[in-house]
């Protein structure tokens, strides 16, 4: 069954919608696919499965020795991110970064226009993080101090 995203009177919004569609920003390269259907018919629509969907994975248990190795190997990098306009942009950027293997944490702020990322350099590169941010339509550059 397909669960409606929202109900507007006698209509239901179905499909996929990005948070930035709600704030009204128009970022090139960002697309959503949603439509209005009669609310009575929304539950009968087939479920939407993205073509890039992957089966869920079972998390690997972390032992204290492996946790200590991860902390010792981690580095922090700061990026300037241009193009973010709202909290939805922050959530999307954090999500795309933390999905990269080796990224432990991403603190993103659209007010400051930054992303501070804690990562394992043996698993992910600066270029991969920049490319991930670029998929959202934003530009990222490393802050040098």
Image: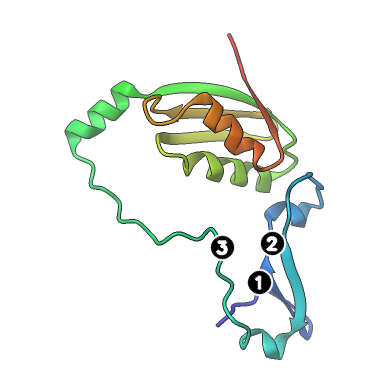
The residue nearer to you, when weighing 127 against 60, is: 127
Badge 1 density bin: few <14, some 14–19, many ≥20, Cα 10 Å:
some
Residue drawn 30% across and 51% down? Answer: 59
Q: Are marks 1 and 3 in contact (CB under 8 Å)?
A: no
Q: Secondary structure at mark 3?
A: loop
Q: How far apart are the two marked residues, 3 and 2, measured between alpha carbons?
A: 16 Å
The residue nearer to you, when weighing 91 against 98, is: 98
Q: Which mark is residue 51?
A: 3
Residue drawn 38% across and 60% down? Answer: 56
Q: Which mark is residue 48?
A: none
| Mark toward the viewer: 1 or 3 | 3
Q: Are marks 1 and 2 in contact (CB under 8 Å)?
A: yes
Give whichever of discs 1 and 3 has the lower sequence position. 1
Residue drawn 70% across and 36% down? Answer: 138
In the rendered structure, the answer to whether residue 9 lies left or right of residue 65 reads: right
Where's the N terminus, which quadrant?
bottom right
Name the residue that disc number 2 marks.
17
Residue drawn 63% across and 42% down? Answer: 90
Q: Secondary structure at mark 2?
A: loop
Report x, y in % for residue 126.
52, 25
For residue 123, above or below residue 33 = above
For residue 62, above or below residue 74 = below
Q: How far apart are the two marked residues, 1 and 2, measured between alpha carbons?
A: 8 Å
| Mark toward the viewer: 1 or 2 | 2
């Amino acid at each position: 069954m397909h669960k409606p995203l929202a109900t507007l009177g006698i209509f239901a919004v179905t499909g996929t919608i990005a948070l930035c569609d709600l704030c009204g920003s128009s970022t090139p390269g960002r697309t959503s696919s949603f439509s209005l259907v009669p609310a009575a018919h929304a539950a009968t629509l087939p479920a939407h499965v993205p073509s890039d969907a992957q089966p869920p994975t079972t998390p690997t248990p972390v032992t204290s020795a492996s946790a200590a190795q991860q902390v010792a190997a981690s580095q922090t990098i700061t990026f300037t991110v241009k193009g973010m306009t709202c909290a939805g942009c922050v959530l999307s950027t954090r999500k795309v970064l933390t999905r990269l293997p080796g990224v432990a944490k991403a603190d993103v702020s659209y007010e400051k226009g930054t992303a501070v990322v804690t990562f394992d350099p043996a698993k992910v590169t600066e270029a991969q993080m920049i490319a991930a941010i670029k998929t959202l339509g934003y530009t990222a550059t490393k802050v040098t101090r």
